[in-house]
Amino acid sequence: MGKKDKSKFKKRLHAEILKEIQKTDSNQPSQTPEIINEPVTPKMQDNLPSSAQLKTASEDPPVLQDSLGLVRSDLKKSAIIIGSIIILIVALFFIDNKTGLLLKFGTGLFRILHIGA
């Protein structure tokens, strides 16, 4: 039953994204560069458009900018979580070297859960 709901959600999301892309495409005239099928020679490289004339990321449709923002925020959250785990492991390593608490804790946990020989 859950799988059925997910497929409906994906279809609805896909349809909304397509509508937004079509709206942005209809509002802006197409500025696609013409494709030349001739090989590029060193003399022709001077005539090619510079990178400043090419389309930048800020001119992308709003749908792409929103998804990039979501991806960035997810990556930041993941980096914070991974960094916290690494800091916790390093702190536990040094605490265990000085006090031996983790060994005592592990032995007690093994007794409670009846794990081991």
Image (cartoon, rainbow, N blue to C red):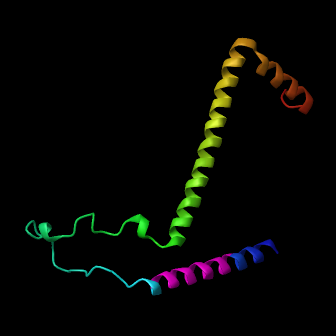
Residue sitting at x 62%, y 40%: 82
Q: Residue 98: horizontal and vertical position, in percent?
A: 70, 12
Q: Is residue 18 magenta?
A: yes
97 vs 13, nearest the viewer:
13
Quadrant location of the C terminus?
top right
Residue ID at (16%, 78%):
38
Q: Main secondary structure of the magenta part?
A: helix
73 on left or right of 53:
right
Residue 84 is one of the magenta-drawn residues? no
Q: Could you tell whether 101 is left or right of 82 in the image?
A: right
**Magenta part of the protein: which range?**
10-25
Residue at image location 37% in from the left, 66% down from the top: 56
Where residue 69 sits: x, y (%)? 55, 60
Image position, residue 16 (x, y; %) = 62, 80
Q: Say which residue appears at 57% left-offset and 51% top-offset.
A: 75
| 117, above or below 6, in the image | above
Please say if 49 is above or below 37: above
- Residue 21: x percent and y percent? 51, 80
Q: Residue furthest bottom?
A: 26
34 lies left or right of 6: left
Furthest toward the front, the residue is 27
